[in-house]
Amino acid sequence: MLFPMAFFPLSDAVAQQRTGTPQAARTTPGKPAEPTTKAPEPAPVPESPAPPYEKDLLRLSEILGSLAFLRTLCSAPDATEWQKRMQALLEAEGTTPGRRDRLAGAYNRGYRGYALTYRTCTASAAEATLRYLKEGEQLSRDLAGRYGG
């Protein structure tokens, strides 16, 4: 299962930032500009800086996505566990929409990377699974040991 990521259409405020011209002031030839009646939107609150373990957390999310696909593909008894672990990670660490999207994006990247390549469980899929289990376990221990958890 892939985790949803928010996709937002280009808003007037973003369009104005990119072009330097308000939406209402941009006109087509022969058509007068329409007056602006909308009040300016407040600037979004900037995210706090990423924690020092962000890179490791994104890698762990990608590993969880890979394992979610590979363990299901190879009919492992713990196949449903990896999605649950990612959900728990999102609940614990997805403190802002941007951070949640980055974590979900890493998970989805790991999942899709193998979904594009494998249709059946092969020896190389089983080997990749073993490597990801080992790397994920090591990352989890390192994160808990260095930063608590």
Image (cartoon, rainbow, N blue to C red):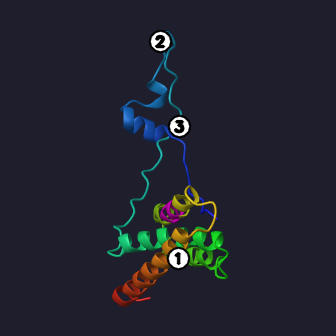
- Mark pair 2, 1: CA separation: 52 Å
Q: Nearer the viewer, residue 36 or 67?
A: 67
* Chain-order first, disc 2 or disc 1: 2
Q: Residue at x 38, y 38 (%)?
A: 17
Q: Is residue 103 magenta?
A: no
The magenta region covers: 104-110
Q: Amino acid at mark 1?
A: Leu
The local secondary structure at tag 1 comes to helix
Q: Which mark is residue 43?
A: none
- Can residue 95 be seen here? The reply is no
Q: To which residue does mark 2 refer?
A: 29
Q: To which residue does mark 1 refer?
A: 89
Q: Nearer the viewer, residue 78 or 7?
A: 78
Instruction: Give above or below for 14 relative to 91.
Output: above
Q: Residue at x 59, y 74 (%)?
A: 87
- Can residue 134 be seen here? The reply is yes
Cβ atoms at labels 2 and 3 below 8 Å apart: no
Q: To which residue does mark 3 refer?
A: 38
Q: Amino acid at mark 2?
A: Pro
Is 138 positioned to the left or the right of 1 in the image? left
Mark 1 crowd level (few <14, some 14–19, many ≥20, 10 Å Cα) = some
Q: Residue 147 lies in what quarter of the image?
A: bottom left
Instruction: Give above or below for 123 relative to 119.
Output: below
